[in-house]
Amino acid sequence: MKFCVRKYIIEVTENNYLKKIILESRDSMVELNKKAPDFTLNTHDGKQVSLSDFLGKKVVLYFYPKDNTPGCTKEAVSFRDNIKSIEEKNAVVIGISLDDETSHKKFIEKFNLPFILLSDKDANVSTEYGVYKEKNMYGKKKMGIERSTFIIDSEGIVRKIFRRVKVDGHVEEVLKALDEI
C-alpha cells in the first residue's frame, strides 16, 4: 500500500502497479504557466541551493539519468558549449540527477561543466517534477529519471516543458524557448 503525504510518496509495501499510478498522477504537479515547485538540494561541493535563489533569472532546469553515461555526457557538454548563448539570455543551467555529490564533482571536473549539478538522491524533487518513472532497460523494469527539461522564467513560472528529451538538437530547442519568454 502506498499513499501521498504532502508532496512525498510513502511506500508501505512493494506494489509496482500502484507505484506507477501514483507517479504518473504526479506529472500534473508541474504545469505550464504555473509557479515551479521550489526545492533545496546539495551541489557537488555540498552547498545547498534552492530554485528560488535564481528569481530574477531564467532557469534551464534539466533532469538527466546518470553522470558519465554517453547520452547524459553529450547533453551536459552541449549545454557547456552553448553556455555563453544561454547566459546572454539572462539564464542559468541547473542539472539534476540521482547521483551523489562525489559523482557530480567528478563529472563537472572531467568535462569542465560551468553550471550547477544538484543531487536528488532520494528522488523527491524528481518525483515532484514528474520525471521519476518506471523505465524498461534491456528487459528489466526499474525506477529512474526520464530525461526532461523545464524552462522557468525570471519570476519562477514554468514556461516550457520538454519531456522524453532527445539529446540531438535539444539545446537549440532550449535557446529558442528562452527567446520566446
Image (tube, rainbow, N blue to C red):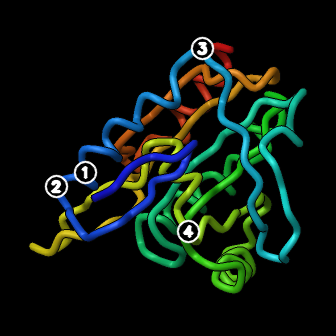
Check disc 1: other Cα within 10 Å, few if <14, some if 14-19, many if 20+: some
Q: Is residue 10 above or below residue 180?
A: below
Amino acid type, mark 1: Lys
Q: Nearer the viewer, residue 10 or 157?
A: 10
- Amino acid under label 2? Tyr
Spatial distance from mark 2 to mark 4, Cα to Cα? 20 Å
Q: Earlier in the sequence, mark 2 or mark 4?
A: 2
Q: Position of residue 135 (x, y in %)?
A: 25, 61
Q: Residue at x 70, y 63 (%)?
A: 117
Tell me how far mark 4 sits from mark 1, CA to CA.
17 Å
Residue 66 x, y percent position in the rendering: 48, 71
Residue 122, numbered label: 4
Reading the image, the residue beneath label 3 is 33
Q: Report which residue position mark 2 lands on.
A: 17
Q: Secondary structure under badge 2?
A: helix
Name the residue carrying label 1.
20
